[in-house]
Image (cartoon, rainbow, N blue to C red):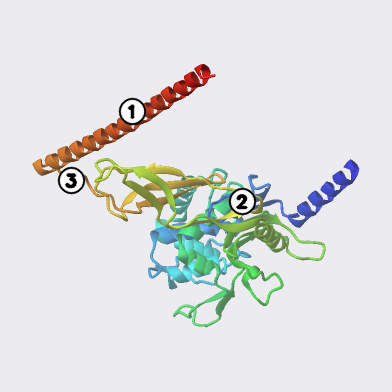
Amino acid sequence: MKRTILITLFFIVLLTTSAFAIDISSENAILIDTTTGRTIFQQGAYSKAFPASTTKIMTAILTLENLELTDTLVASENAVRSVPSGGSICDIQAGEEFTVEQLLEGLLIASGNEAANILAEGISGTIEEFVVLMNKKSNELDLTLTHFVNSNGLHNENHYSCAYDLAKMYRYAYNKFPDFRRITGMKAFSLPPTSIHTFDDRSFNNSNKMIIESNKYYYEPCTGGKTGFTSEAKNCLVASASKDGIELIACVLGGGKTEEGESQRYLDTKALFEYGFSNLVVKTIAKSGDILDTLEVENSKNRSDRLNAVLSEPVTIAIEQKDLNKDFEPKITITRDMVAPISSGEYIGKATYNVYGTYYDVDLFSGNSVEVKPDFSAGDLVADILIIILRIIIVIVIIILILRFYNKVIRKNAKMSRSSRTRRYNARFRR
């Protein structure tokens, strides 16, 4: 019997494990929750690696933080000619002028190396000064395994990162800049003719094949991404995906090709996303309007008055299947004095939810009003005295009634006792 139970349990565990199994061929990979930043899966994610053109995520971040999309920049000779042959370009010519938005499209969609240089010079004056800004921003984002020496990701032994840092960098850009999400999700873009380049022949598909419907690597939940390749870095990809309310970011570095000649970076990225969507479920752990606490209020009109601390908005997160029935209790912090008067809808503090090490702060508001105790007056004193006197009279009356009832019971018991003794006496002497 025990053997049968053990065999059954073994197969249950085996089936459960295989349902969520994942096999990643790339050297470095990670999957994180876009909302929380929590790591869901990693393989070599903290190992030093070459980022190639995924570097351009940082270039895009600094562009969006320092320039307007409508600003225009002129391509310098240095920005164009410093790109070695064989690198990805948008075919921009020295002296051409484009908007920042057009250059960002060239940067993130076509992975144009000269577009990265033009933006770098437009922000900092020189590429060298821009690199200083890149490393400063890297420190601000706590990318501890990242160091930049150029704006585009062309190979350099001192230009490196890791899968964890790149996913973290992408998450920052994805969550903060709607234009980053929009551009990385575009399927194609074109540069218009100019007086220098008069041909209308600069159209480019997104280098991320996961968003191209006609491509065999197309993956419908994918919302965008940034590719990279050098012979030293191999195939790289940082991408985002969304399905059933769950948003994920995957990073794959050092990808090669399968025996059939297929790209591991796309196969691995899809496998990571599928793993995440299979393991996670969206749950609302707290609803808007939920009463999280009931608070005492000083100086209230009635001593029984209490204030309801109400949640201002719902807390909806992606959690692991195994935690579906888990309760996430918040820490309540009240930031104002609980002294009347308090009106309904006033901000009174916050509720903090700790979900897998990520903290969510949600505002708390007063769910009801509490009126202040009226000011003291002679009329109030007279009323209070009369109430006290009335209460005393009621107590005295109750005591009198109890005493009368008690005396009546005693007399009745005494009478019954005398009668009983008389009957016993008569019965004894009349025999």
The residue beneath circle 1 is 407
Query: Within 10 Å of the Cα at label 3, are there few (<14), some (14-19), or many (20+) other Cα atoms?
Result: few
Q: Is residue 72 left or right of residue 247?
A: left
Q: Earlier in the sequence, mark 1 or mark 2?
A: 2
Of tags 1 and 2, which is closer to the observer? 1
Q: Is residue 82 left or right of residue 304?
A: right
Residue 354, x across and y down, in percent: 51, 45
Residue 262, x across and y down, in percent: 76, 65
Looking at numbered disc 2 in the image, what kind of residue is underneath it?
Asn
The residue beneath circle 3 is 374
- 281 or 58: nearer the viewer: 281
User: Which residue does the image show at 63% across and 56% down from the upper left?
Assistant: 280
State the residue lying farthest toward the front: 431
User: Which residue does the image show at 52% across and 18% down from the upper left?
Assistant: 428
Q: Which mark is residue 160?
A: none
**SS under mark 3:** loop
The answer to whether one can see residue 420 in this image is yes
- 367 or 282: nearer the viewer: 367
Looking at numbered disc 3 in the image, what kind of residue is underneath it?
Pro
To which quarter of the image does residue 231 belong?
A: bottom right
**SS under mark 2:** loop
